[in-house]
Amino acid sequence: SRRPHARPALDAAVMLESAGRLPPFTAFGTDLEAEGALARVASQLAYQRELIIVCSDAAPTASASNALNTVLQLRALGLHHVLFLSDSPASCLSMRGALPDIACVWSSRLPKTMPANPGLCAKMYWGYAFYFYDLRKHYAARLAIEFGVNVLQTDTDVVWLSNPYPTLKGIYRGVQLVSMSDTPLVNAGVFYAQDVRPGDGAAWVLRELSRRLHLFITNSSAVKQYVPWAQPPYFANIDEQTIMNDVLRSSIANVTSYAQATAHWEVKKGATGTRKNRTFRWKETAEYALLNFLGKEVPRRKVR
């Protein structure tokens, strides 16, 4: 979605380089669920209303190494306003051993272990990825909507060779949500939210994405509320990318859709599919018809 240009473009040569310009970060190791914690982080780390989110635990794996490398890449570009979201105070301390001034926090919002009422998706694939899917979408939404912070979320398998802000504040200056393209529309791992206001379309997308992820992670039975013909055990898809695309298509076409990320995966992996239920006909459902409609309507709206 677009908003009118709010301010003149900044000098591209030094655009939003925060190195040496941030106050001391006193929220190190803080639980973001503590009262006032997120406001404190935003006040100390957001530079000219900009913040970058990177997520990882501190286990001795390639994932943690990639995350640290991502932070170092961004810092090499002069971008020090990076929030490192981890899974515990101990993980923050481990990361501090590698980068002494890393701005690391964690969250008790969601247990790191598999939830009590997991769907088949969680049972089959549960890992830290799902934990961080929930956290990063939740805090990106809160920062953008409640605190007016422009949030760049990045995966850790991304190489940053140059400062992205000249592009984000240049040709994408009037675009509220910018994402790397992927199937069918966008990639959920790398996106930027700017100039989001409470109650506008971009705010709805961020809030709704966070809500759906948390709901299906913590309560797989909720699938039945949105896909009435689904049968237990529910697959309860909790992949952030497919859910984000459903939410975006809902917003673009002004309809509420759970057709791809939720309904279709109940057919593919849940107990409702035709391999397990020979009387079920996916192509006769309202969700199948909605997918066909969205496949035509979304391109017609010409959202780039």
Image (cartoon, rainbow, N blue to C red):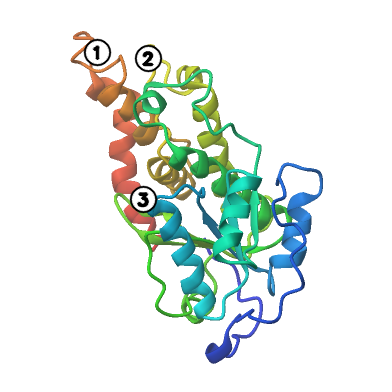
Of residue 14 and residue 92, the one placed in the foreground of this image is: 92
Give x and y (percent) for residue 91: 58, 49
**Res 262 → quadrant:** top left
On the rendered structure, is 161 left or right of 140? left
Of residue 204 and residue 180, the one placed in the foreground of this image is: 180
Of residue 59 and residue 117, the one placed in the foreground of this image is: 59
Q: Which residue is mark 2?
A: 229
Secondary structure beneath label 3: helix
Residue type beneath disc 1: Phe
- Mark with earlier residue (2, 1): 2
- Mark with earlier residue (1, 3): 1
Residue type beneath disc 2: Trp
Q: Which residue is mark 3?
A: 298
On the rendered structure, is 105 left or right of 267? right
Determine contact: label 2, label 1, CB under 8 Å: yes
Residue type beneath disc 3: Val
**Given this view, does label 3 or label 2 mark the residue nearer the observer?**
2
Secondary structure beneath label 1: loop
Q: Which residue is mark 1?
A: 280
Marks 1 and 3, how far apart at CA: 28 Å
